[in-house]
Image: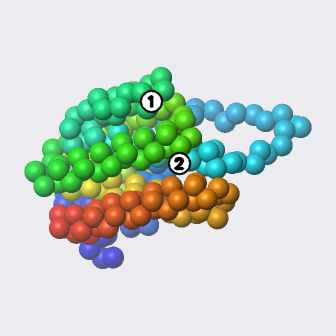
Amino acid sequence: MQEGNKILSNKFGYRKMATPSTLCCAILLFLFPLHFMATTTPSCPGDCEPNDADDNDRFHFAQNLEFLEAEFFLYGALGKGLDAFEPEFAKGGPPPIGGKRANLDYLTRRIVEEFGYQEIGHNREIVRRTGGIPRPLIDISSQNFAKLFDKAVGYNLDPPFDPYEDPIKYMLAVYAIPYVGLNGYVGTTPCLKKFASKQVNKNLILLKADIKDILIILVKSLNCL
């Protein structure tokens, strides 16, 4: 834990330190679709009632994160996103904002590229099973990450955090994503009703766990933790 506290000051030359829990909270906020799309909170009529989500609804919700993962991995490794491989998956949704090729070493780039291809497969499975949803507007720009890491440490970093600048910063930005996806699918399991849905969910859990484990090894090899 102490090594984790030192990372922002030692690796980047920043003067203050962030706790891992605060840093994780800020990164997790980045993952929710409302952070990308919503500017106002919609009002609800007084007579409205909650709707029970079916299996397809739960996979549609998860696809928001699958879009984020695919775009961030593909842009980081290749400088191009989902539209370059499976444009029909977006269903008319807007392209992401601010994605670009990250300054990665050869090994990290190849691993992240494979992650991107795997996320294409995750989106393909959800589209095949449920029809999918339009891609939301996703902001993966350096400026957006900088704002979130400023919140993580409690002050404005100088220079601003840029995940595309080097492998360590990219891994810091990406580290929480598969973990959130993994726990999301695990939490969804008891709510699914159809056997086929549970099978798909199980496969996605195994794949997310693989990505998370590989990321842990890669992050440690870069001395990020």
The structure residue drawn at horizontal position 10% and vertical position 51%, both measured from the top left corner, is 106
Task: Please rate how many residues cluster around mark 1, counting C-alpha atoms within 10 Å: few if below 14, some from 14 to 19, many from 20.
Answer: some
Three-letter amino acid code at disc 1?
Ala
Q: Which residue lies furthest to the right in this view?
A: 47
Question: Where on the picture, by quarter, is residue 141?
Answer: top left
Task: Please state if 126 lies on the left or on the right of 2 as rendered.
Answer: right
Quarter of the figure with the C terminus: bottom left
Q: Give SS at disc 1.
A: helix
Nearer the observer, 169 or 118: 118
Q: How many numbered discs?
A: 2
**Residue plotted at (53% across, 59% down):** 199
Residue 152: x percent and y percent? 41, 56
Distance of label 1 from label 2 (alpha carbons) = 14 Å
Circle on res. 62:
2
Quarter of the view holding residue 144: top left
Residue to which mark 1 is pinned: 90
- Depth check: 130 or 177 in front? 130
